[in-house]
Image (tube, rainbow, N blue to C red):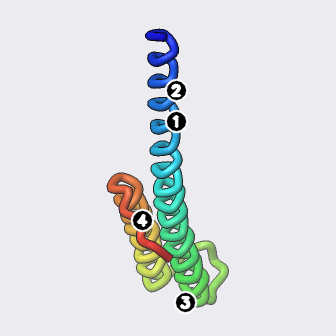
């Protein structure tokens, strides 16, 4: 009888642990999705900025203009900022509902 009670208790603990793990997985998945969305958004913004920067230098001499370089640096900053925000979301697990 004592062995059966121990097994039942162990099984109950295992089921409870798995149930809690499932809750955490959904939150972790939401957090990962939010971080990915931040990365995708900042990447798209930076790509658009770089595309516009190319238009600032109509010459095809292989030398970028100062204006083009400035916009490309801003695009790099957007990428880095987006990555930092995504990492912060992942570190804190701060997913917001959609």
Query: Which numbered disc covers residue 15?
Result: 1
- How far apart marks 4 and 2 lie (CA) works out to 32 Å
**Residue carrying label 3:** 56
Front tag of 1 and 4: 1
Q: Are marks 1 and 2 in contact (CB under 8 Å)?
A: yes
Q: Helix or strand or loop: what does disc 1 sit on? A: helix
Cα separation, mark 1 vs mark 4, equals 26 Å
What mark, if any, has residue 95 been given in the picture? 4
Residue 22 vs 43, above or below: the answer is above
> Do residues under tags 1 and 4 come within 8 Å of each other at their CB atoms?
no
- Residue at left 50%, top 77%? 98
Disc on the earlier residue, 3 or 1: 1
Percent position of residue 29, x then y: 53, 56
The residue closer to the viewer here, 33 or 83, is: 33
Q: Quadrant of residue 59?
A: bottom right
**As drawn, 18 above or below 83:** above
- Residue pictured at 39% horizontal, 70% vertical: 77
The number of callouts visible is 4
Check the image and name the residue furthest to the front.
1
The image position of residue 3, as x and y in percent, is 48, 10
Left or right: 48 as drawn, with respect to 31: right
Distance Cα–Cα, label 3 vs label 1: 62 Å
The alpha-carbon separation of the residues under discs 2 and 3 comes to: 67 Å
- Circle 1 crowding by C-alpha within 10 Å: few under 14, some 14–19, many from 20: few
Q: Which residue is mark 2?
A: 11
Q: Residue at x 45, y 44 (%)?
A: 20
Give the CA distance from mark 1 to mark 2: 6 Å
Sequence order check: which comes first, mark 2 or mark 3?
Answer: 2
User: Residue 84: x, y in percent?
Assistant: 37, 61
Give the Cα separation between the discs numbered 4 and 3. Answer: 38 Å
């Amino acid at each position: 009888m004592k062995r059966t009670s121990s097994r039942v208790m162990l099984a109950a603990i295992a089921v409870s642990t798995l149930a809690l793990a499932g809750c955490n997985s959904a939150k972790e998945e939401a957090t990962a999705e939010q971080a990915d969305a931040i990365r995708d958004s900042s990447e798209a913004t930076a790509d658009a900025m770089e595309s516009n920067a190319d238009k600032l230098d109509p010459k095809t001499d292989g030398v970028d203009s100062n204006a083009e370089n400035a916009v490309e640096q801003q695009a790099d900053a957007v990428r880095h900022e987006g990555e930092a925000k995504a990492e912060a979301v992942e570190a804190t697990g701060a997913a917001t509902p959609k």
